[in-house]
Image (spheres, coloured by chain):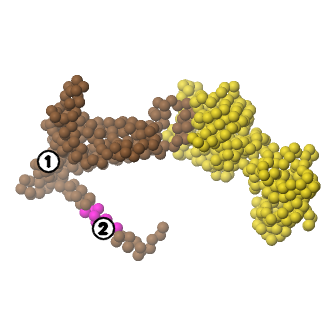
Chain colours: A yellow, B brown
């Protein structure tokens, strides 16, 4: 149980700087998800935390201790690897006891810990099997079991769900979340899947090119993305972006359709180029001739709701509508953003305009 | 994939030459040897059936049992040396990561050398009065050795020569095994706090076992049939102290022309080799992970 502090952390591979200057505070018992596209440095950061990669600058603290030069074994962390990294020649039990044996614990001390972890993870019947004889989901549990028995200060997860099929992934996701509540241990979870990030995290850290783009609760990051990258990365399908211009209290789109700035989450006025960002689920149907004209190209019924791919204001957009609407390709819909849910971004800096939010949006 | 009959005929015709070659070159001599092992071949070239006479004779033949002893002595000594040194060498090469091509070629060179050449070379080096080996020993103040001429040292010396020639081969196999081990397992071990010694004994070695057994199979087939190097250097001497079963069989057949008995010896050796391979394959299945 410990907090983690990263101050001006730098990681380089030869001449390539992967993490230029990173600052992050992770509270004790917090579930943090590092999310970003591949190559954003999230896995590198996790490996730096684990002690598998050396630090080239700055400080890394676990609890009150600076651990920059502390080897992995003495950082009191446990890691669940993407490919699980189970010892293939050992049984499940041996996999779980190995680290404890390395610490010099006796069989009498080890036994109850293993039994308890195995019961918690529902892998008691497999204790004497080898990893080869287990399914992907079971291996995943063993990997977690191996981490749990060590009773570490910090759990690190490196995309542990990416080798599971979709159904199992949902299940294990929920299990890890439940587990994190039970264990009350600081957890750092790396994923490229924004759904995993949204569902599991206390706080999400969105990364790109080794730089933190935004840190916040899932709701915060979803509702108030700080920039175009975060807006596009969090949420599926992705936020729609429409180039526009502010003219007084109106937003003028490429096809000359106009939306009142009062609908935006941010207060904006004057004149200038902007990018209007609207999530697919934040469109509502309006009377003909109002809002945006959207000509439907393609309809994807998902059951619970229906995704409509359409052309509006010269852009491809996706809108999430009620299945009762029964939209058809070729049809024209009139759409307007839900009040207070659309965002404006600066096309040059890509930052959200006026991060001061409208109070009563 | 379904193959129609016409295709099947074509396929059979195409593979026929290979089939004939295989039967002619492998199956025929093998079956003929087995048949010969039940015959008596007289000095006048007459062949008469003798049932299991050759095999009965073997049981009471001291030279046969000497051959078995020498064969296994040489086998276990050489195999142990080659596995231990080969694994050590492979670990060194693995740590060295990028190795210049020339070094790699040097490592490969001993087993590229024909055994006859290697044998001649070592004969010169180990010559008791003129060779470099004794010169080095005496320069260091150590007593000179008779090497291949010593009844005590002849087998260890042969094992040493074979080890010189074949350790790099074993090392290359083990290196391949090392390179195919999952790197994340080592990271897991690092986080689990395993010392270098624990990593070697508890992780690397068990994971390498299937590779080591493969190397054992490959070396066993050669070592149990140990022939050319001995034939070049000692021809079984001094006084039978390096007379492996293979050498004994060869001399029985081609120096004393007792082809029936020689065939029985060779069939026995084949059974030993086959048994070793089967046993090692079982072992490999047992250590598979």
Residue A241 or residue A197, whichever sits in front = A241
Q: Which span of residues is magenta-colored?
A: B15-24
Find residue A344 and report its horizontal and vertical position in percent.
84, 52
Q: What element does badge 2 sit on?
A: helix
Sequence-wise, the earlier of marks 1 and 2 is 2
Residue B165 visible in the displayed image: yes
Q: Residue furthest top?
A: B141
Find residue B67 and report its horizontal and vertical position in percent.
20, 41
Q: What element does badge 1 sit on?
A: helix
Find residue A122 and report its horizontal and vertical position in percent.
64, 40
Identify residue for label 2: B17
- Can you say whether A94 is above or below A272 in the image? above
**Residue A15's image quarter?**
top right
Q: Report the residue at 14% width, 56% height from top.
A: B49
Q: Report the residue at 14% width, 52% height from top.
A: B259
Q: Chain of mark 1?
A: B
Numbered label attached to residue B252: 1
Numbered label attached to residue B128: none
- Can you say whether A283 is above or below B16 in the image? above
């Amino acid at each position: 149980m410990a907090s983690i502090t990263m101050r001006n952390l730098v990681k380089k591979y030869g001449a390539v700087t992967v993490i230029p200057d990173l600052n992050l505070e992770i509270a004790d018992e917090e579930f943090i998800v590092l999310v970003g596209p591949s190559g954003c440095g999230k896995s590198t950061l996790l490996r730096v935390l684990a002690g598998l990669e050396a630090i080239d600058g700055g400080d890394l603290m676990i609890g009150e201790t600076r651990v920059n030069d502390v080897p992995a074994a003495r950082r009191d962390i446990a890691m669940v690897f993407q490919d699980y990294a189970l010892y293939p020649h050992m049984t499940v039990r041996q996999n779980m006891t190995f680290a404890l044996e390395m610490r010099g614990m006796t069989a009498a001390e080890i036994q109850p810990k293993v039994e308890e972890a195995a019961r918690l993870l529902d892998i008691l019947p497999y204790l004497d099997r080898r990893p080869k004889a287990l399914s992907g989901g079971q291996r995943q549990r063993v990997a977690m079991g191996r981490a749990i028995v060590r009773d570490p200060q910090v759990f690190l997860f490196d995309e542990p769900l990416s080798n599971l099929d979709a159904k199992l992934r949902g299940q294990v996701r929920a299990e890890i979340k439940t587990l994190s509540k039970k264990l009350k241990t600081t957890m750092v979870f790396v994923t490229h899947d924004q759904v995993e990030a949204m569902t599991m995290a206390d706080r999400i850290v969105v990364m790109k090119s080794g730089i933190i783009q935004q840190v916040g609760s899932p709701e915060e990051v979803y509702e108030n993305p700080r920039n175009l990258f975060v807006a596009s990365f969090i949420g599926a399908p992705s936020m729609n972006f429409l180039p526009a211009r502010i003219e007084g209290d109106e937003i003028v789109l490429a096809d000359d359709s106009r939306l009142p700035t009062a609908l935006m989450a941010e207060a904006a006025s004057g004149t200038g180029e902007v990018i209007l960002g609207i999530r697919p689920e934040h469109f509502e149907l309006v009377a003909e001739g109002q809002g945006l004209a959207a000509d439907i190209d393609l309809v994807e019924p998902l059951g619970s709701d229906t995704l409509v791919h359409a052309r509006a204001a010269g852009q491809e957009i996706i809108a999430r509508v009620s299945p009762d609407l029964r939209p058809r390709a070729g049809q024209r819909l009139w759409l307007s953003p839900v009040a207070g849910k659309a965002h404006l971004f600066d096309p040059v800096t890509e930052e959200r305009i006026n991060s001061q939010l409208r109070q009563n949006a | 994939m379904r193959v129609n009959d016409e295709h099947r005929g074509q396929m059979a015709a195409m593979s026929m030459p290979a089939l004939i070659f295989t039967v002619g070159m492998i199956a025929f001599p093998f079956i003929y040897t087995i048949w010969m092992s039940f015959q008596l071949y007289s000095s006048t070239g007459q062949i008469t059936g003798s049932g299991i006479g050759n095999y009965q004779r073997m049981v009471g033949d001291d030279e046969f049992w000497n051959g078995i002893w020498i064969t296994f002595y040489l086998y276990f000594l050489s195999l142990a040396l080659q596995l231990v040194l080969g694994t050590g060498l492979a670990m060194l090469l693995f740590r060295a990561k990028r190795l210049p091509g020339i070094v790699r070629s040097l490592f490969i060179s001993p087993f590229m050398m024909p055994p006859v050449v290697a044998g001649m070379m070592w004969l010169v080096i180990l010559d008791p009065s003129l060779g470099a080996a004794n010169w080095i020993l005496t320069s260091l103040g150590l007593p000179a050795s008779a090497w291949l001429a010593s009844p005590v040292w002849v087998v260890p010396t042969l094992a040493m020569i074979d080890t010189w020639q074949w350790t790099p081969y074993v090392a290359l196999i083990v290196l391949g095994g090392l390179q195919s081990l999952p790197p994340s397992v080592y990271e897991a071990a690092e986080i689990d706090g395993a010392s270098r010694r624990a990593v070697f004994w508890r992780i690397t070695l068990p994971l390498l076992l299937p590779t080591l057994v493969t190397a054992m199979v490959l070396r066993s087939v050669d070592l149990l049939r140990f022939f050319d190097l001995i034939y070049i250097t000692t021809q079984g001497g001094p006084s039978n102290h390096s007379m492996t079963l293979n050498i004994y069989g060869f001399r029985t057949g081609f120096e004393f022309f007792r082809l029936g008995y020689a065939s029985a010896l060779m069939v026995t050796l084949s059974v030993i080799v086959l048994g070793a391979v089967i046993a090692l394959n079982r072992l490999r299945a047992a250590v598979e992970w």
